[in-house]
Image: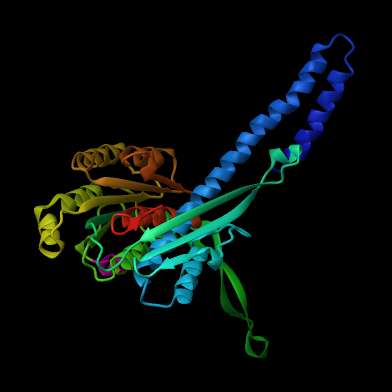
Amino acid sequence: MSNFPNFKRQLSRLFGTFIGDRNGNIALLFALTLVPLLLAVGASVDFVRAYNVQDKMQADIDSAMLAVIGKVGKVSDDELKGEIVKWYNAQTNITGGYVLNTKDMTIDTANSTVQAKVTSQVNTTFMKLAGIQSIPIGASSTVAGGATESKAALSMYLVLDRSGSMASQTKTSYTYSCTTGKGKKKVTTTCTAYYTKIESLKLAVTSLLTKFIDADPTSTYVRTGAVSYNGSMQTPTNLAWGTTGVAAYVAALTATSTTDSSLATQTAYESLIAGSENSAHMTKNQQVPEKYIVLMTDGENTTTTADTNTKKWCDKAKLAKIEIYTVAFMAPSRGQALLNYCATDSGHYFPAENTSDLVSAFNKIGVKASKKLVRLAK
């Protein structure tokens, strides 16, 4: 919005020109109606921004609530409230953002239910012309869980890009303790570095897996697997109970070579539809699981043939009622187009332009899938 003051000066000059015109009243009438028109258009921009912030705020509070629901009755109410605040603060990345007050939390141990609400203000830009400095927003969440509650089973397969471009830096920085100088001049200070894309991916996957650990601590309902790809498919990790195998697999990923997502997508599809996958769940939890693919890339396939083949396996997965989430991480237009195509619908596609966006996308996927495991009442 750095050009906004210039815009106002240009608008003032325009008004002066019209008002000084003695040839008729049309110019004056136009000038008088332009201000309300601009306010109306500007207000819509401000409200859209406020809606987007509120949407993220809702996802953050839902995520925090899902993360702690399993601890109801196992820790004190004050400890549980502290956990909610901790998880919530870890999710939000808006400076000076939300107000999450423990006084606005209600814990019902008997019914394993937790309620919380959060409020904020979104500063306006255009509406300041009308004297409106901010728009109040809020979100509330109620989660019901408990050891005796029936839970749904799920299987999720991650398809992750580890091509050479994943080694490049993002624009998201972090600080760490470091030393400079030598001998007596050696001092400990704070240094700044930037996350690489592959480091960002590891943070994002950890965020997703944490949702499953919290929702299914005994690994009775969740099975996960992962495969990575560059110019060819890398050795996958098979679907297994819990998240340990996938966490270790992703932690070891390195970035090299070109990009071809087709065989990796095929592997995810075939692993999920295998009869052995349903049998594993039926033996342990007597359910046919919900099934998910999470397909991520930071680029585009080296050949259009790889695009065509990837789409073919995405189509097969959709016919098999497998939900497909896709995440385009700083990807070019062709990569975005492929992932838009593969996603189950627009709500299953996530564009990410920095580390925070990527972590948020995987976190939201984890929250949505975790809703199958615990009841999100409101």
Viewer-closest of 360 and 247: 360
Image location (x, y in percent) of residue 100: 55, 62
| Span colored in magenta | 242-247
Q: Quadrant of residue 279?
A: bottom left
The reply to whether the magenta stretch includes residue 114 is no
| Residue found at the far top of this picture | 23
The residue at 53%/49% (across/down) is 54
Q: Quadrant of residue 238?
A: bottom left
Left or right: residue 68 versus residue 263 is right
The residue at 61%/75% (across/down) is 190
Colour approach in the figure: rainbow
Location of the N terminus by quadrant is top right
Q: Is residue 371 visible?
A: yes
Image location (x, y in percent) of residue 67: 39, 65
The residue at 66%/30% (across/down) is 40
Examine the rendered structure and indicate whether residue 65 appears above or below residue 136. below
Image location (x, y in percent) of residue 94: 58, 57
The reply to whether the magenta stretch includes residue 244 is yes
